[in-house]
Amino acid sequence: MFFASDNTSPAHPKVMQALADANEGYAMPYGNDPIMDRVRQKIRDLFEAPEAAVYLCATGTSANSIALACLCQPWQTVFAHRNSHVEEDECGAPEFFTGGAKITLVAGDHAKMDPKALREALTFTGRAGVHNVQRGALTLTNTTENGTVYSVSDVAELAAIAKSFDLPVHMDGARFANAIAATNASPAEMTWKAGVDVLTFGGTKNGLLGVEAVVLFNPDKAWEFELRRKRGGHLFSKHRYLSAQMEAYVTDGLWMQLARQANDAAARLSAGILDIEGASLMHPTQGNTVFASWPRGGHKRAHDAGAAYYFWPMDQDLEGPEDELLSARLVCSWCTTSQDVDQFLSLLRG
Amino acid sequence: MFFASDNTSPAHPKVMQALADANEGYAMPYGNDPIMDRVRQKIRDLFEAPEAAVYLCATGTSANSIALACLCQPWQTVFAHRNSHVEEDECGAPEFFTGGAKITLVAGDHAKMDPKALREALTFTGRAGVHNVQRGALTLTNTTENGTVYSVSDVAELAAIAKSFDLPVHMDGARFANAIAATNASPAEMTWKAGVDVLTFGGTKNGLLGVEAVVLFNPDKAWEFELRRKRGGHLFSKHRYLSAQMEAYVTDGLWMQLARQANDAAARLSAGILDIEGASLMHPTQGNTVFASWPRGGHKRAHDAGAAYYFWPMDQDLEGPEDELLSARLVCSWCTTSQDVDQFLSLLRG
Amino acid sequence: MFFASDNTSPAHPKVMQALADANEGYAMPYGNDPIMDRVRQKIRDLFEAPEAAVYLCATGTSANSIALACLCQPWQTVFAHRNSHVEEDECGAPEFFTGGAKITLVAGDHAKMDPKALREALTFTGRAGVHNVQRGALTLTNTTENGTVYSVSDVAELAAIAKSFDLPVHMDGARFANAIAATNASPAEMTWKAGVDVLTFGGTKNGLLGVEAVVLFNPDKAWEFELRRKRGGHLFSKHRYLSAQMEAYVTDGLWMQLARQANDAAARLSAGILDIEGASLMHPTQGNTVFASWPRGGHKRAHDAGAAYYFWPMDQDLEGPEDELLSARLVCSWCTTSQDVDQFLSLLRG
Amino acid sequence: MFFASDNTSPAHPKVMQALADANEGYAMPYGNDPIMDRVRQKIRDLFEAPEAAVYLCATGTSANSIALACLCQPWQTVFAHRNSHVEEDECGAPEFFTGGAKITLVAGDHAKMDPKALREALTFTGRAGVHNVQRGALTLTNTTENGTVYSVSDVAELAAIAKSFDLPVHMDGARFANAIAATNASPAEMTWKAGVDVLTFGGTKNGLLGVEAVVLFNPDKAWEFELRRKRGGHLFSKHRYLSAQMEAYVTDGLWMQLARQANDAAARLSAGILDIEGASLMHPTQGNTVFASWPRGGHKRAHDAGAAYYFWPMDQDLEGPEDELLSARLVCSWCTTSQDVDQFLSLLRG
């Protein structure tokens, strides 16, 4: 009953095995290992993008920030949802890597950017010429921070607006696998076919120890990406251990299998919570995260039994009237079992 | 016969086992895992520094750069040897993390900073007040990039010069273990007792997959370090996998055992090369790296047999007269065996 | 009838004379001119701040940005009104000078920050520890971008909130003189006595060619300011020409005389517009700027007669029905005459 | 007898008159003043460069730094003479504006870059691919910091080396006028015809209050320059006062007249010093600055009579044996008279 975050779950055994296998003998460093050659090819195949440049980073923050720095000049601004990870959870990393670009916050329900709000923000930005920061890039998070998912047409609509202003589009796919599992879209449809130029293809939250691939569908900025990655201290000397994780991830559909397990657990959890009297969802459950409220009594029982999750917002109090509603975020991962979910639900029901 | 770099060697089996052990169940992210608590304590004990702040980074470049950014303001300069890693091999990472500080290059034979040159550089810097960049920090690399080692008294002398100008001292210890193995100094003697304020305590080149500890003997900058690490994208969510590596490293003296193996291999290699007619060392062999020249014939035979190493400087030609001397860098690691060395030497002798 | 901006007006004759006087013979450069010694003393006297550090910059953007960089670390955020100059009109200069800090936008009517909104923004910021940017500094603009004025008690209230979070307070006083003229507060009351730590004391918009003083009431950051100013290319070699302007400005109350002239013109203009049928003010007229709307017919007549000002917002159309209301910004300066105002009003009335 | 620096001299009367003339009535801000239109045209004509983009900055440091930031990425390095202003006298401004680029120091006598040293530095840089900072731009200072002058063929030779590595070339022409006066080259010959891409065309040291033009012979980076200038706080609202200075400067050859006066004074001074027994020049006198040594007795007499100049290096002592040689830097400016020089020389001779 551990729903605190998907980054608290362990790595999948196949990933651990791949690490062990990669540990044989000597290997060329800095991404010149033969495993990386295979990873590059597998990801190009997966995305139907034979020209794409593919790189590995060990953290999502670095993957996002280096990608954005390649797309946005220091005097420009990144358009992001106000609840995006780049705005709220990276301690200013995009500002650091871009050399001081801004992030323009765009509204929209359930952490999904509203197309009208995006168009307005784009129109407003740079209206006074040299006195204003200029339009830089659009970044979309899929699956969003609220556990909702952009469909292919959602992405295409927003990307088209960005393109009408000549802006490149980045997708923060820390939970990309969950979005694919939710929509059954192909990776290509969800990305470059819909207008995405650069993808952070997350693995860390979905069964790896710590690896994200950055996929530049247009390789023009590949060398710049490499230099920024190195200069940011994110080029690993013993790179084979990143390669090995990612190879396991994209082999035999492991990434999709794990995402489906997480999404299924969240769906089961979400449905079960809705059966509780007084319970409701704050956001639709579309990926692996459930945002819901239910009476304090259920929270107390879960807490006493050792269940782990965060109140959302965090400043709520476990003490108080039994029937008052408290809201929470519950994150499922690849290793959340039906038993975990059912045991948790039975506690909630009391 | 793989002497290309110590970062091409695999991780030690105990480290792999520690990773596997750490993969059980859920763990709190971002350094709040219980393994990290043990790591912190073990490193404090190892360095006789109960107050030290201890953090993990996954690359040496990030560890060095974040540490230097805590010590050096943007309008200041870091005093470094001209052959240091921070100057030559990090694509400007210290400049990036500090916000544009300079690196002032200090001379000295065999990649060891000359005290007189340091004093002169310090005296010269900032002489014109606001018009000049100001003195920021001293960084020393031990073991150096030329495979030589600063003794405790070497460090103390240079640190004292820096302190006389009120400068903090950083040590890039990517190969710190090899320096300790070479000198039999205690970790405390080589660092804070000699005037070092912040140490990058390297593990990656010495049997880990990719972890360096940063030890701030004075914890005043600890929170700043944490913020800079996060903002640089270097705070790992699944931090336990870093912790596990470092725990294995500092348990039962593994770090020293591995460094001794590497140093011993280098000593055997160095001595063997000197037995070859015409051969000589470019730098004294004190750590795990040998810089030597010998006749081209030996290079050809080694090359044909598949031995891997770099010419040093790199722009030398394998083709040419047999007896012409070509120089090379040979790096031994924890997994370099006596057999490797002897086989290589026999090829050189022909 | 030139109401486009106060930065389109000429310099006052006394300022030009001071420049001419300063042009005699040789003078020490970089702020070591004797005029600067007098300026420093006069400003200290004016602000009853004998310990204050006083520096000159030639642009408001540089003065604000260097000041903020001294108060806000790269991983922190500046709390500013969403209609502030630092947010909207400096092309990201604060982000550049701080090394990538954020600006957190705080709401409030008429470009005055709402204390409740400030408190909420402060409370929200940094709630997740290392994952968030941290609280950095508060900046207030007085006179605001909407021509309104913070009273001494307004400033004190907002500064006290900032201080309760240990934040320093900056005041962008590009139109500080107009605020003093509007409130009859003393410079000390409006600044350090109300909790302001650093003031940009503007002169450019109020009769100078281009000089702002930065007053650090606490001189602890003085040397850092000097280094940042130099490094930003804002330390003038022939500094005497900045000093001379500022000396004229703070001699015999010229700065207040000019601000009163501008404020009086705006008051006359504002009152006259309100006499027009259908006209209204978008913001109260408290300083030297009027935000008002009146029927298109009046705009057309003014435009045909060569009056200069901006529609506000800018994307309104001079062509259309006569009685439709169009809104505008009208900025008065020290050289706006009653005749200018009356002539303009008569055009508006038709 | 004021030889401390050319930035201690006053502005020329024609420049002051131009300022006064510019002070009439209202003028559009931020470079949209009509005087700037004329300045742009005059500079294009002067440089036979009808397509050039022309901008004004108020300090040499800002002009150089913004120009270099347009030419050099953060992960690249600027090749500069080790005695250049950008390296020694700007407190790291190029590092700041470029976002942390390096400056690679190139040797050469008398502050003139040695072509062989440049080629070696270029060849060495970036040899290890992504691990190294990359080649960015070449910057040459003409007149140099040692008072020597690059001929057109000197510039062409160095620029050709840079171009063979695809590098752009910047010229720091803080004393460009003195170099033109020394060589009788045309402005076009000395710049774009010899391979210079961007020129800082200095006025401050040669009779203005504080204006430098930046001339981008290829206007591709013009918009980037404008944004960087604004973001750096260097776009003046009351821009007409910069325009007016520069217009006077390039009208009727004033800039050349003033430079010739300064060079002639330096030549007279240099020749006179060489007549003194024991005296010698440290660098050839080619522009407006003399580097010379003569016996302490002469220094004492000059000092007692109130002559102002710097020992070079600065740490020499006025007290000591009369006949010991002390070295000094003597800078002449447009307002140095023959009488000043002769009076000074008579003191030296005793």
Image (spheres, coloured by chain):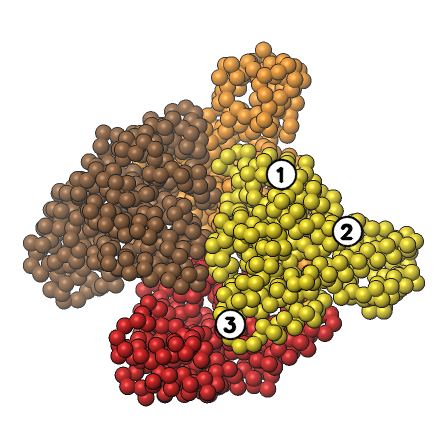
Chain colours: A yellow, B red, C orange, D brown
Residue at 76% over, 66% down: A335
User: Is label 1 in a helix, a strand or a loop?
Assistant: helix
Q: CA distance from mark 2 to mark 3?
A: 41 Å
At label 2, the amino acid type is: Gln
Residue at 46% over, 88% down: B338
At label 1, the amino acid type is: Ala
Write down the chain letter for disc 3.
Answer: A
> Looking at the picture, does residue A314 appear above or below residue B168?
above
Q: Which residue is mark 2?
A: A286
B268 lies left or right of D342: right
Disc nearest the viewer among 2 and 3 = 3
At label 3, the amino acid type is: Ala
Q: Which residue is mark 1?
A: A160
Residues at marks 2 and 1 on the same chain: yes
Say whether residue D302 is visible: no
Mark 2 surroundings within 10 Å by alpha-carbon count, few (fewer than 14), some (14 through 19), many (20 or more): many
Say whether residue A267 is visible: yes
Residue A34: x, y in percent? 53, 67
Disc nearest the viewer among 3 and 1 = 3
D184 lies left or right of C254: left
Q: Which mark is residue A27?
A: 3
Task: Indicate the quadrant where residue C150 lies.
Answer: top right
The residue closer to the viewer here, B109 or B257, is B257
Residue at 48% over, 60% down: A231
The residue closer to the viewer here, D320 or D219, is D219
Q: Name the residue at the front extreme.
A: B304
Q: Are marks 2 and 3 in contact (CB under 8 Å)?
A: no
Mark 2 and mark 1 lie on one chain; the one further toward the N terminus is 1
Mark 1 surroundings within 10 Å by alpha-carbon count, few (fewer than 14), some (14 through 19), many (20 or more): some
> Looking at the picture, does residue A306 appear above or below residue B50?
above
